[in-house]
Amino acid sequence: MNEFENNEQLSEEEALSAEENVLEETASADAPAFKEVATAEPEKKNPKKSGIASFYEYVETFSYALAVMVLLFLFVFRYVSVDGDSMKHTLHHQDKLIISNLFYTPETGDIVVINPETHNAAQEPIIKRVIATEGQTVLIDYANWAVYVDGVKLDEPYIEPMREEEKRLWGDGVGMRVDSNKYIEEFTVGEGKVFVMGDNRNHSKDSRNSEYGEMGVNRILGRVVVRVSPDFGFVE
């Protein structure tokens, strides 16, 4: 073999070697790259921190609820206590009530807490039932315990227990007590006024009394919404 043949053989081997290198580089370039991914272990919760967070959430919720209740009782509801027996047997002495004057317009039959114009700052409001409002005519039949508003007799079953007690004490002929000659005849309730009476008709100082008379609607503190104690429930 001469020198030329040797050189030619070397050239072919070099060419094959170079081609193999190119193929390896290409294969390396086409092969997907695999990266080592570190798997993070889940963070372990600290029971102590979790308990404190729950406590603060509870306190925050309670604080919001308390703030809402305070606002409601400042601007929407009031908590009152009955003093006396003028609304017996519907309400009794020391009954605890919730009243509200939110968007309230008085109507016949409503039980309201009202502060008469004649009361001074030291006197407590009174609780009575609305009999009639402005513009309505009222006729009280004292002998027969009947009240007519705009010519219609009111259905008042709540006065019957008290009326029966009066009959047992004073006989069947006992009538409703007359406190003022002003309301003997039929009359019309004045503008912006209400005429109120207690359910315990013969033991109630109300609009029939010359000291009170008809009272201003703006003197109503609120309508009784519910009795809280001793027996929870709505009052009619």
Image (cartoon, rainbow, N blue to C red):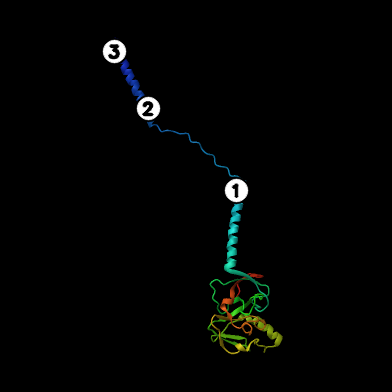
For the C terminus, the quadrant is: bottom right
Q: Earlier in the sequence, mark 2 or mark 1?
A: 2
Q: Nearer the viewer, mark 3 or mark 1?
A: 1
Residue 59 in percent (x, y) is at 61, 55
* Above or below: residue 102 compared with residue 14: below
How busy is the neighbourhood of tag 1: few (under 14 within 10 Å), some, or many (20 plus)?
A: few
Residue 132 in percent (x, y) is at 56, 82
How busy is the neighbourhood of tag 2: few (under 14 within 10 Å), some, or many (20 plus)?
A: few
Q: Quadrant of residue 190?
A: bottom right
Residue 10 in percent (x, y) is at 32, 15
Outermost residue toward the top in this view:
2
Q: Out of 187 and 227, give the one closest to the viewer.
A: 187
* Above or below: residue 105 compared with residue 67: below
How busy is the neighbourhood of tag 3: few (under 14 within 10 Å), some, or many (20 plus)?
A: few
Q: Which numbered disc covers residue 50?
A: 1
Secondary structure of residue under mark 2? helix
Q: Out of 134 and 42, give the one closest to the viewer.
A: 134
Q: Earlier in the sequence, mark 2 or mark 3?
A: 3
- What separation in Å lies between label 3 and label 1 (alpha carbons)? 85 Å
Q: Which numbered disc covers residue 187?
A: none
- What separation in Å lies between label 2 and label 1 (alpha carbons)? 55 Å
* Above or below: residue 41 compared with residue 52: above
Question: Which residue corresponds to the image point at 35% horizontal and 26% vertical from the top-left?
Answer: 23
Q: Earlier in the sequence, mark 3 or mark 1?
A: 3
Secondary structure of residue under mark 3? helix
Q: In the image, is 67 to the left or to the right of 16? A: right
Residue 119 in percent (x, y) is at 64, 78
Question: Which residue corresponds to the image point at 29% horizontal and 12% vertical from the top-left?
Answer: 5
Q: Amino acid at mark 2?
A: Glu
Q: Which residue is mark 2?
A: 25
Q: Which numbered disc covers residue 5?
A: 3
Q: Amino acid at mark 1?
A: Ser
